[in-house]
Amino acid sequence: MDITWLGHGTFEFVLPSGETLILDPWTDGNPKYPKDYEIKRCDTMLISHGHFDHIHDAVPLAKKFHPKVIAIFETAAWLEKKGVENTSGMNKGGTQKAGSVSVTMTHAVHSCGIQEDDGSIVYGGEAAGYVLRFEDGRTVYFAGDTNVFSDMALIAELYQPELCFLPIGDFYTMGPREAALACRLLKAKTVAPMHFGTFPPLVGRPAQLADLVTGTKVWELEPGRTVKW
């Protein structure tokens, strides 16, 4: 599959069939979003939580492409009120099919208030992560925004993800020290760091994580540069 990091926590996965998944869409105003990059297709949209830097462009992209939109139940209900069709609200531990991909929602340690246009914050359920299982048998764990938590060992036991996407920026999520422990709990073969360098407080860097792990490849992606996996 083709994987393109679009900056911060936003990713595009394109399967060999052309089926396209967009994760945590933040394009407008994202300082790391690649200049002139255009999302041309979206069959499934996955939302980890309701903070603006993960949901900002969910509504316009959903209205443009009409994908299946997966989020925790309360966030999905909020999106419906904003005019998003084909939402599929779920909860942690549940699994559903999205096109050819099996999607399981996992725990995350983070908040999930959704900020309205007037500045008020409404309840968005809880933050979550996702395990994605593909038809070729490979498995990805997308942690969303989270600190390390001991039940990551259960994610490893249940799903054995080969590729993990972990936040490392610190301040709002775990930093490299915590992410290194997450790698050990997940028994991760390969980790792609995310959610760093976007704002001044997000000081964690992939090189710091690489210095702290053994047996895990730290796969440093560049925004806008498509890689094969």
Image (tube, rainbow, N blue to C red):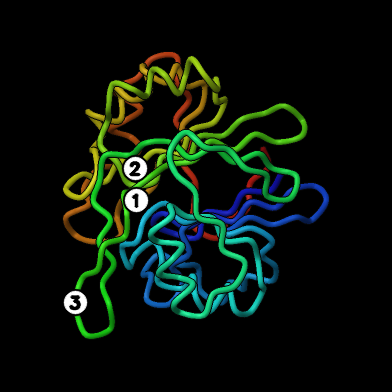
Residue 198 % position (x, y): 30, 60
Instruction: Give the crowd class for mark 1: few <14, some 14-19, many >=20 residues within 10 Å.
Output: many
Label 2 sits on a secondary structure element that is strand
Query: Which is closer to the viewer, label 1 or label 3?
Result: 3
Amino acid on which the number 3 mark rests in the picture: Ser
The image quarter containing residue 209 is top left
- Residue 195's mark? 1
Q: How many angstroms separate mark 2 from mark 3 (CA)? A: 26 Å
- Residue 227's mark? none
Q: Height in image: 190 above or below 71?
A: above
Name the residue nearer the viewer: 3 or 159: 159
- Residue 167's mark? 2
Q: How many angstroms separate mark 1 from mark 3 (CA)? A: 24 Å
> Would residue 36 be found to the left or right of residue 213 on screen?
right
Q: How many angstroms separate mark 2 from mark 1 (CA)? A: 5 Å
Label whose residue precedes the other's in the sequence (2 or 1): 2
Name the residue nearer the viewer: 58 or 12: 58
Label whose residue precedes the other's in the sequence (2 or 3): 3
Amino acid on which the number 2 mark rests in the picture: Pro
Residue 56 % position (x, y): 40, 72
> Would residue 139 be found to the left or right of residue 10 on screen?
right
Return the residue found at the far right: 17
Q: Which residue is mark 3?
A: 120
Q: Which residue shows up at 24% across the image and 38% down it?
A: 174
Cβ atoms at labels 2 and 1 below 8 Å apart: yes
Amino acid on which the number 1 mark rests in the picture: His
